[in-house]
Image: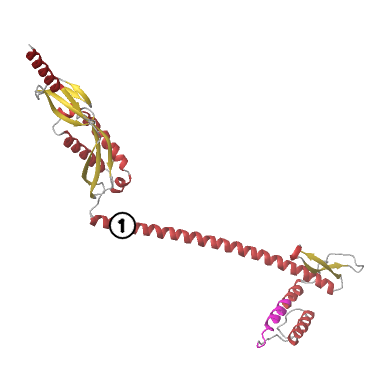
Amino acid sequence: MSLLIGTGIIFAFIIALASVHFIPPKRVHVITFLGTTPIAKLETGVHFTIPRPFAVTSAVIPVDVVAEKVQVQIKSQDNLVFELPATLQFQVTDAMRFAFERDQPVAQMTNLVVAALRSAASQMEFQEIYDDKITIQQEVEATVSEHLESFGIRIVDLVIDDPELPHSTQAALNNIREAEWGRRAAEHEADATRVRMVGEARAEAESTLLKAKAIAGFRMEIAEGNAASIAVMQGKIGVRWVENVIGEGETAQKVKTPVYVDRSGNPVSPPEMDLPAEVILDFFKVLDSNETIRDASKNESGLIMMPLPGGNNRMGSNISDWVAAQEASKRMSG
């Protein structure tokens, strides 16, 4: 009797041991009855089923994220042929379907992704593919996601790398790009030169205008001073020199400025000249001649030629000619 009980205990232990399944992490075991009919899908942990050999582990499915690299030959819309490398990251979501619905599901999934990738990229030009790989990725995922559900698979990510051109094609494209960059650089340089020239011309115009205004003001001051001088020479007004301080601090300077007075000594403005315009113009011509003679006389080896009084070469009135001659004689003798 005790032998029978002991045998029963050993047999029960063997049956229990044959019924236990230890499933490691990130794995799913698909259990079938005698290797034909699926009866259980066991995830990570300890599980009990009908004992072996009735329960058979027909498939061990990894459920972590798996990466599959593909190399797809593409002909772009601008007729460039190149390789487009991509990495497909996927995960099994339904181990039963993955194990029994499809034969070689990973290979079928890869073929679907490659076909969708080639279809999406062939509708774009090479530079668009290079610049906008996210659009291709989204289009491929939208195309194959529904099909992959029947495989028991989902796409985690599709990473598309830069296109790989043949060396000869890459060299030709580099030459084209260098030429294009050279053209753009030349255009930018031309634009910069044009802007600089316009700026310089505008600055020159403004500078010339300011100089003209300054010269006009300077001439106005000279004209007013000459008019007052003529009035003094004619005895219409007198002049008194007054010392004034211009500026402040270290830059202050003492200068003498004329104050015009009448015969009683009262300040007065110079009267308007009643001389003919020709006489006034002649007077200024003589002043210009005097300036020229003064500048020329600084050169010791210089030769000064002046028109003689009388004749047809008349410069200025008789008075101004005489004054100019006297002044020139003084400067030259000095």
Q: Secondary structure at mark 1?
A: helix
Q: What residue type is disc 1 on?
A: Ile
- In this orientation, which residue lies closer to the viewer: 319 or 206? 206
Name the residue at 17% across, 33% down.
105
Q: Residue furthest front?
A: 2
Q: Position of residue 203 (x, y in %)?
A: 57, 61
Is 123 contained in the magenta span?
no
> Which residues make up the magenta segment?
287-301
Determine which residue is flagged by label 1: 176
- In this orientation, which residue lies closer to the viewer: 38 or 145? 38
- In this orientation, which residue lies closer to the viewer: 137 or 243? 137
Q: Quadrant of residue 133?
A: top left
The reply to whether residue 38 is visible in this rendering is no
Name the residue at 27% across, 43% down.
160
Q: Residue furthest right?
A: 264
Name the residue at 44% across, 60% down.
189
- In this orientation, which residue lies closer to the viewer: 108 or 314? 108
In the rendered structure, the answer to whether residue 141 lies left or right of residue 29 reads right
In the rendered structure, the answer to whether residue 91 lies left or right of residue 331 reads left
